[in-house]
Amino acid sequence: MSESRFNMDGLAEALTPRPVRYFERIGSTNDVGLDWLVENAAEGAVVIANEQSSGRGRLGRRWFAPPGTALMLSYLLRPPLRWLPRCGMLGALAVCETLESFGVTQIGVKWPNDVQVKRLKICGVLPEARWHGSRLCGVALGIGINVRVNFENTPFATTATSVETALGKPVDRVELLGELLRRLDHWRSRLDDDALYQAWRSRLNMLNERVSVLNRDTVVEGVAEDVDTEGALLVRTGDGIVQRVMAGDIALR
């Protein structure tokens, strides 16, 4: 489909007065966003790319999508230090609400921040912080949504999907972006509100299931009983002990 507005002029006009930096091709929007934070970028500013060559996922994974097939951006925040762990919740929840507003159903969050449709990954969220000594400069909240990536006949055919595949019709990335930014703005102002945590928690799709979590060099296995207000996963292991896992790669068992 034609997306004549998905360029610097079109996006600047559509998103005014929000500060925008657009790149036809870039290494990583988070890298640009983190540097922009040091340059005193306004909160809510956004870096957008049509193609990323060195995008990052969680745990250092590479993230790449062909030009024009995904919505790739970094949303800039300056959260109070105590609410830093909630930035990932903010991103995943905003994506869920945005996709639902477009008619996507059966959406869930695979802990901590992967958005899934029918258990297939449709979006990844990666918050990265920039520090100056012990002072937090801000957070670049990286978001990558598969819009029209065709996963047929690829190794990801059984693990990933796209918005247009889920809807069965074309989607305008500028309209998708506009709604996503509205949801991000809404929840950004409510980082300290328990409603954010509760709304994110309610969308987790692996609670009360047996899981295996790779946390650095340690594997934690058991039942995913709950998450706390900082986003940590609470896993009850076979010996009855509840282990608190702040980050890791989770798989259902």
Image (spheres, helix red, strand yellow):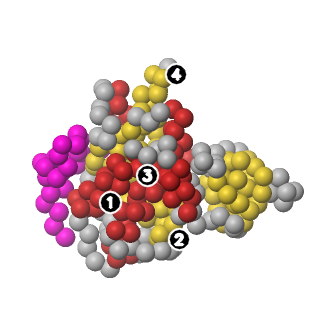
Is 21 a magenta residue?
A: yes
Q: Quadrant of residue 138?
A: top left
Q: Which residue is mark 1?
A: 70
For image coordinates 35% across by 26% down, the residue present is 38
Magenta highlight range: 1-27
Q: Residue at x 62, y 65 (%)?
A: 206
The residue identified by callout 2 is 119
Q: Which mark's residue is nearer the viewer, 1 or 4? A: 4
Number of the label disc, if any, that sits on residue 91: 3
Task: Say which of 43 and 27 sits in front.
Answer: 43
Front residue of this view, candidates 194 and 209? 194
Give the CA separation, mark 1 to mark 3: 16 Å
Reading the image, the residue beneath label 4 is: 134
Considering only order in the chain, which callout, 4 or 1, is on the residue closer to the N terminus?
1
Say which label, 3 or 2, has the lower sequence index. Answer: 3
Q: Position of residue 87 (x, y in %)?
A: 47, 45
